Image (cartoon, rainbow, N blue to C red):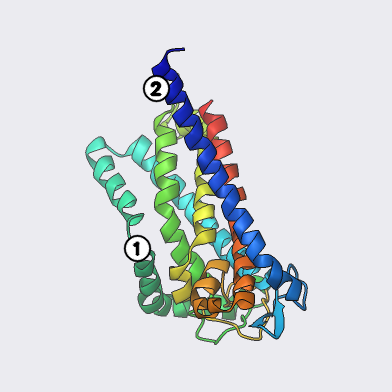
Amino acid sequence: MRPGDRIFQFLTTGAGVFVVSLIGLIGLFLLVQAIPALRADNVNFLTSQTWQTEPNDMKFGIMGLLLVTVYSALLALIIAMPISLGIALFLTQYAPKRLARPFAYVIDLLAAVPSIIYGLWGLMVFAPTIEPFSQWVNDTFSWIPIFAAGNVSPDMRGTIFTAGIVLAVMILPIITSLSREVFERTPTPHIEGALALGATRWEVIRTTVLPFGKAGYIGASMLGLGRALGETIALAIILTGAVGREFTFSLFDGGATFASKIAADYAELNNEISAGAYIAAGLVLFLLTFIVNFAARTIIAKKGD
Protein backbone atom coordinates (compact mmCIF):
# COMPACT_ATOMS: atom_id res chain seq x y z
CA MET A 1 0.00 0.00 0.00
CA ARG A 2 1.35 3.41 -0.97
CA PRO A 3 2.00 6.04 1.75
CA GLY A 4 -0.83 8.23 0.51
CA ASP A 5 -3.29 5.34 0.78
CA ARG A 6 -2.11 4.51 4.29
CA ILE A 7 -2.52 8.12 5.41
CA PHE A 8 -5.99 8.28 3.91
CA GLN A 9 -6.95 4.98 5.55
CA PHE A 10 -5.63 6.21 8.90
CA LEU A 11 -7.59 9.46 8.66
CA THR A 12 -10.87 7.83 7.66
CA THR A 13 -10.53 5.12 10.32
CA GLY A 14 -9.69 7.75 12.91
CA ALA A 15 -12.71 9.83 11.93
CA GLY A 16 -14.99 6.81 12.30
CA VAL A 17 -13.53 5.86 15.66
CA PHE A 18 -13.83 9.47 16.83
CA VAL A 19 -17.53 9.67 15.97
CA VAL A 20 -18.33 6.35 17.65
CA SER A 21 -16.26 7.29 20.69
CA LEU A 22 -17.98 10.67 20.91
CA ILE A 23 -21.41 9.04 20.98
CA GLY A 24 -20.23 6.62 23.66
CA LEU A 25 -18.75 9.44 25.74
CA ILE A 26 -21.99 11.44 25.53
CA GLY A 27 -23.92 8.44 26.81
CA LEU A 28 -21.34 7.86 29.56
CA PHE A 29 -21.46 11.52 30.60
CA LEU A 30 -25.25 11.43 30.86
CA LEU A 31 -25.14 8.23 32.91
CA VAL A 32 -22.50 9.53 35.35
CA GLN A 33 -24.34 12.82 35.84
CA ALA A 34 -27.66 11.05 36.37
CA ILE A 35 -26.52 8.54 38.99
CA PRO A 36 -26.65 10.89 42.07
CA ALA A 37 -30.21 11.94 41.25
CA LEU A 38 -31.29 8.36 40.60
CA ARG A 39 -29.92 7.35 43.98
CA ALA A 40 -31.86 10.17 45.64
CA ASP A 41 -35.10 9.32 43.83
CA ASN A 42 -37.86 8.19 46.19
CA VAL A 43 -40.11 6.65 43.52
CA ASN A 44 -39.60 4.17 40.72
CA PHE A 45 -37.79 6.04 37.93
CA LEU A 46 -39.17 3.84 35.16
CA THR A 47 -42.82 3.50 36.19
CA SER A 48 -43.76 6.64 38.12
CA GLN A 49 -45.52 9.60 36.45
CA THR A 50 -44.61 11.97 39.30
CA TRP A 51 -42.09 14.70 38.53
CA GLN A 52 -40.85 16.55 41.58
CA THR A 53 -37.22 17.64 41.70
CA GLU A 54 -36.90 19.39 45.05
CA PRO A 55 -33.36 18.53 46.26
CA ASN A 56 -34.66 17.40 49.66
CA ASP A 57 -37.60 15.39 48.29
CA MET A 58 -36.74 13.89 44.91
CA LYS A 59 -39.70 12.08 43.34
CA PHE A 60 -39.36 11.79 39.60
CA GLY A 61 -40.25 9.15 37.04
CA ILE A 62 -40.19 9.05 33.27
CA MET A 63 -43.34 7.08 32.52
CA GLY A 64 -45.50 10.17 31.89
CA LEU A 65 -42.83 11.78 29.70
CA LEU A 66 -42.26 8.54 27.83
CA LEU A 67 -45.95 8.02 27.11
CA VAL A 68 -46.50 11.57 25.83
CA THR A 69 -43.32 11.41 23.74
CA VAL A 70 -44.16 8.10 22.12
CA TYR A 71 -47.88 8.83 21.77
CA SER A 72 -47.38 12.14 19.98
CA ALA A 73 -44.60 10.75 17.77
CA LEU A 74 -46.63 7.69 16.75
CA LEU A 75 -49.66 9.86 15.95
CA ALA A 76 -47.45 12.04 13.76
CA LEU A 77 -46.05 8.97 12.04
CA ILE A 78 -49.50 7.48 11.39
CA ILE A 79 -50.60 10.72 9.75
CA ALA A 80 -47.39 11.47 7.84
CA MET A 81 -46.64 8.02 6.40
CA PRO A 82 -49.58 7.64 3.98
CA ILE A 83 -49.41 11.31 2.92
CA SER A 84 -45.67 11.06 2.28
CA LEU A 85 -46.16 7.84 0.34
CA GLY A 86 -48.81 9.43 -1.86
CA ILE A 87 -46.70 12.53 -2.54
CA ALA A 88 -43.57 10.48 -3.30
CA LEU A 89 -45.45 8.20 -5.71
CA PHE A 90 -47.12 11.18 -7.40
CA LEU A 91 -43.79 12.97 -7.92
CA THR A 92 -42.00 9.89 -9.26
CA GLN A 93 -44.73 8.10 -11.21
CA TYR A 94 -47.42 10.54 -12.27
CA ALA A 95 -46.28 14.16 -12.25
CA PRO A 96 -44.54 15.59 -15.34
CA LYS A 97 -40.95 16.66 -14.70
CA ARG A 98 -41.74 20.37 -15.10
CA LEU A 99 -44.18 20.01 -12.19
CA ALA A 100 -42.39 17.39 -10.12
CA ARG A 101 -39.17 19.37 -9.66
CA PRO A 102 -40.63 22.62 -8.23
CA PHE A 103 -43.16 20.64 -6.18
CA ALA A 104 -40.30 18.61 -4.69
CA TYR A 105 -38.45 21.83 -3.86
CA VAL A 106 -41.48 23.12 -1.98
CA ILE A 107 -41.73 19.89 0.04
CA ASP A 108 -38.00 20.02 0.85
CA LEU A 109 -38.37 23.65 1.88
CA LEU A 110 -40.71 22.61 4.70
CA ALA A 111 -37.75 20.90 6.38
CA ALA A 112 -35.93 24.27 6.54
CA VAL A 113 -38.69 26.01 8.50
CA PRO A 114 -37.52 26.55 12.12
CA SER A 115 -39.28 24.52 14.79
CA ILE A 116 -40.33 27.65 16.66
CA ILE A 117 -42.31 28.78 13.61
CA TYR A 118 -44.18 25.49 13.57
CA GLY A 119 -44.81 25.85 17.28
CA LEU A 120 -46.20 29.37 17.02
CA TRP A 121 -48.32 28.41 14.00
CA GLY A 122 -49.62 25.37 15.84
CA LEU A 123 -50.52 27.35 18.95
CA MET A 124 -51.94 30.53 17.43
CA VAL A 125 -53.41 29.37 14.12
CA PHE A 126 -53.87 25.62 13.88
CA ALA A 127 -55.08 24.86 17.43
CA PRO A 128 -57.96 27.38 17.38
CA THR A 129 -58.89 26.26 13.87
CA ILE A 130 -59.06 22.57 14.76
CA GLU A 131 -60.75 23.11 18.13
CA PRO A 132 -64.33 22.58 16.83
CA PHE A 133 -63.26 19.35 15.12
CA SER A 134 -61.52 18.16 18.28
CA GLN A 135 -64.62 18.91 20.30
CA TRP A 136 -66.81 17.04 17.80
CA VAL A 137 -64.51 13.99 17.91
CA ASN A 138 -64.60 14.04 21.70
CA ASP A 139 -68.38 14.42 21.85
CA THR A 140 -69.04 11.75 19.22
CA PHE A 141 -66.46 9.12 20.09
CA SER A 142 -65.83 9.71 23.79
CA TRP A 143 -66.78 6.09 24.47
CA ILE A 144 -63.49 5.12 22.80
CA PRO A 145 -60.68 5.64 25.35
CA ILE A 146 -58.30 7.42 22.97
CA PHE A 147 -60.98 10.03 22.17
CA ALA A 148 -62.21 10.54 25.73
CA ALA A 149 -61.80 13.84 27.55
CA GLY A 150 -58.17 14.24 28.52
CA ASN A 151 -56.36 15.65 31.51
CA VAL A 152 -56.16 19.29 30.33
CA SER A 153 -58.67 22.11 29.88
CA PRO A 154 -61.77 21.43 27.77
CA ASP A 155 -60.75 23.82 24.94
CA MET A 156 -58.60 20.91 23.70
CA ARG A 157 -55.92 23.09 22.17
CA GLY A 158 -52.70 22.11 23.91
CA THR A 159 -53.24 18.38 23.45
CA ILE A 160 -51.37 15.45 21.97
CA PHE A 161 -53.90 15.50 19.12
CA THR A 162 -52.86 19.01 18.08
CA ALA A 163 -49.18 18.39 18.75
CA GLY A 164 -49.20 15.14 16.77
CA ILE A 165 -50.68 16.79 13.68
CA VAL A 166 -48.11 19.62 13.82
CA LEU A 167 -45.36 17.02 14.24
CA ALA A 168 -46.71 15.19 11.18
CA VAL A 169 -46.26 18.34 9.12
CA MET A 170 -42.71 18.67 10.44
CA ILE A 171 -41.61 15.13 9.56
CA LEU A 172 -43.51 15.04 6.26
CA PRO A 173 -40.62 16.43 4.15
CA ILE A 174 -38.13 13.98 5.66
CA ILE A 175 -40.17 10.89 4.83
CA THR A 176 -41.26 12.26 1.44
CA SER A 177 -37.76 13.22 0.27
CA LEU A 178 -36.15 9.93 1.23
CA SER A 179 -39.04 7.88 -0.16
CA ARG A 180 -38.92 9.82 -3.42
CA GLU A 181 -35.22 9.06 -3.82
CA VAL A 182 -35.84 5.36 -3.20
CA PHE A 183 -38.73 5.13 -5.68
CA GLU A 184 -36.69 6.98 -8.33
CA ARG A 185 -34.11 4.17 -8.17
CA THR A 186 -36.58 1.54 -9.31
CA PRO A 187 -34.90 -0.08 -12.37
CA THR A 188 -36.33 1.42 -15.55
CA PRO A 189 -36.34 -1.96 -17.40
CA HIS A 190 -38.64 -3.37 -14.70
CA ILE A 191 -41.12 -0.53 -15.15
CA GLU A 192 -40.96 -0.63 -18.95
CA GLY A 193 -41.31 -4.40 -18.94
CA ALA A 194 -44.44 -4.22 -16.81
CA LEU A 195 -45.94 -1.54 -19.06
CA ALA A 196 -45.09 -3.59 -22.15
CA LEU A 197 -47.02 -6.50 -20.69
CA GLY A 198 -50.10 -4.29 -20.45
CA ALA A 199 -49.93 -3.32 -16.79
CA THR A 200 -51.62 -0.09 -15.77
CA ARG A 201 -49.65 2.62 -13.97
CA TRP A 202 -51.14 1.53 -10.62
CA GLU A 203 -50.26 -2.12 -11.33
CA VAL A 204 -46.69 -1.03 -12.09
CA ILE A 205 -46.55 0.79 -8.75
CA ARG A 206 -48.07 -2.13 -6.85
CA THR A 207 -45.95 -4.89 -8.41
CA THR A 208 -42.68 -3.11 -9.13
CA VAL A 209 -42.14 0.25 -7.43
CA LEU A 210 -43.53 -0.54 -3.98
CA PRO A 211 -41.77 -3.91 -3.56
CA PHE A 212 -38.49 -2.31 -4.65
CA GLY A 213 -38.81 0.71 -2.36
CA LYS A 214 -40.59 -0.83 0.63
CA ALA A 215 -37.54 -1.14 2.86
CA GLY A 216 -36.37 2.37 2.00
CA TYR A 217 -39.81 3.77 2.73
CA ILE A 218 -39.88 2.04 6.11
CA GLY A 219 -36.39 3.33 6.86
CA ALA A 220 -37.42 6.87 5.92
CA SER A 221 -40.43 6.57 8.21
CA MET A 222 -38.20 5.44 11.06
CA LEU A 223 -35.96 8.48 10.54
CA GLY A 224 -39.06 10.63 10.66
CA LEU A 225 -40.03 8.93 13.90
CA GLY A 226 -36.60 9.71 15.34
CA ARG A 227 -37.09 13.36 14.40
CA ALA A 228 -40.50 13.42 16.05
CA LEU A 229 -39.22 11.81 19.26
CA GLY A 230 -36.56 14.49 19.69
CA GLU A 231 -38.62 17.56 18.79
CA THR A 232 -38.34 20.23 21.47
CA ILE A 233 -39.41 23.82 21.03
CA ALA A 234 -42.55 23.26 18.94
CA LEU A 235 -44.01 20.86 21.49
CA ALA A 236 -42.90 23.03 24.40
CA ILE A 237 -45.02 25.82 22.87
CA ILE A 238 -48.04 23.71 21.91
CA LEU A 239 -48.54 21.19 24.72
CA THR A 240 -50.41 22.21 27.86
CA GLY A 241 -48.94 20.85 31.05
CA ALA A 242 -50.99 18.44 33.13
CA VAL A 243 -49.66 19.12 36.60
CA GLY A 244 -50.76 16.53 39.12
CA ARG A 245 -52.77 14.58 36.56
CA GLU A 246 -51.68 11.25 35.15
CA PHE A 247 -51.65 10.30 31.51
CA THR A 248 -54.97 8.69 30.50
CA PHE A 249 -54.06 7.41 27.00
CA SER A 250 -56.40 9.93 25.39
CA LEU A 251 -55.37 11.95 22.35
CA PHE A 252 -56.78 14.93 24.22
CA ASP A 253 -54.30 14.59 27.07
CA GLY A 254 -51.70 17.26 27.63
CA GLY A 255 -48.35 16.86 29.31
CA ALA A 256 -44.75 17.13 28.18
CA THR A 257 -42.28 15.12 26.15
CA PHE A 258 -38.72 14.43 27.26
CA ALA A 259 -37.29 17.27 25.21
CA SER A 260 -40.00 19.83 25.92
CA LYS A 261 -39.82 19.13 29.67
CA ILE A 262 -36.08 19.68 29.75
CA ALA A 263 -36.41 22.89 27.72
CA ALA A 264 -39.29 24.27 29.79
CA ASP A 265 -37.58 23.62 33.16
CA TYR A 266 -34.09 24.65 32.12
CA ALA A 267 -33.83 27.08 35.06
CA GLU A 268 -33.78 24.14 37.48
CA LEU A 269 -30.53 22.83 36.03
CA ASN A 270 -28.49 25.13 38.29
CA ASN A 271 -28.90 22.60 41.11
CA GLU A 272 -26.78 19.48 40.69
CA ILE A 273 -29.28 17.00 42.11
CA SER A 274 -32.27 18.50 40.33
CA ALA A 275 -30.30 18.73 37.11
CA GLY A 276 -29.49 15.04 37.43
CA ALA A 277 -33.18 14.18 37.12
CA TYR A 278 -33.40 15.97 33.79
CA ILE A 279 -30.13 14.46 32.65
CA ALA A 280 -31.55 11.01 33.46
CA ALA A 281 -34.58 11.82 31.31
CA GLY A 282 -32.23 13.03 28.59
CA LEU A 283 -30.34 9.75 28.79
CA VAL A 284 -33.53 7.79 28.15
CA LEU A 285 -34.36 10.06 25.19
CA PHE A 286 -30.79 9.66 23.90
CA LEU A 287 -31.09 5.86 23.99
CA LEU A 288 -34.58 5.92 22.46
CA THR A 289 -33.64 8.11 19.49
CA PHE A 290 -30.35 6.25 19.00
CA ILE A 291 -32.16 2.91 18.77
CA VAL A 292 -34.78 4.26 16.35
CA ASN A 293 -32.23 5.96 14.08
CA PHE A 294 -29.90 2.96 14.16
CA ALA A 295 -32.78 0.72 13.10
CA ALA A 296 -33.66 3.11 10.28
CA ARG A 297 -30.10 3.28 8.99
CA THR A 298 -29.81 -0.51 9.16
CA ILE A 299 -32.98 -0.96 7.09
CA ILE A 300 -31.82 1.56 4.48
CA ALA A 301 -28.33 0.03 4.33
CA LYS A 302 -29.72 -3.46 3.77
CA LYS A 303 -31.89 -2.17 0.97
CA GLY A 304 -28.89 -0.44 -0.57
CA ASP A 305 -27.02 -3.74 -0.63
Q: Where residue 57 sits: x, y (%)?
A: 71, 85
Residue 255: quarter of image: bottom right
* Residue 189 in the image: above or below residue 48: above
**Looking at this view, is 145 or 170 the one in front?**
170
Q: Please provide percent x and percent y for residue 239.
A: 50, 76
Residue visible at 66% across and 61% down? 32
- C-alpha distance separating marks 1 and 2: 37 Å
Q: CB atoms at circles 1 and 2 under 8 Å apart?
A: no
Against 191, is 85 above or below? below
Q: Amino acid at mark 2?
A: Thr
Q: Mark 2 or mark 1, which is nearer the start of the sequence?
A: 1
Relative to 78, is 180 on the left or the right?
left
Where residue 193 appears, as percent x and y from the top left, is 43, 18
Q: Residues within 10 Å of mark 1 (few under 14, many from 20)?
A: few
Residue 189 appearing in the image:
no
Instruction: Residue at 40% x, 77% y: name it.
Output: 123
Q: Amino acid at mark 1?
A: Pro
Q: Which residue is mark 1?
A: 114
Residue 74 in which image quadrant: bottom right
Quarter holding the C terminus is top right
Q: Is residue 86 visible?
A: yes
Q: Residue at x 44, y 41 (%)?
A: 179
Q: Position of residue 137 (x, y in %)?
A: 55, 75
Q: Which residue is mark 2?
A: 188
Nearer the observer, 143 or 56: 56
Q: Give above or below for 261 relative to 97.
A: below
Residue at the limit of the structure toward the left, as seen here: 98
Q: Residues within 10 Å of mark 2 (few under 14, many from 20)?
A: few
Residue at 40% over, 39% down: 180
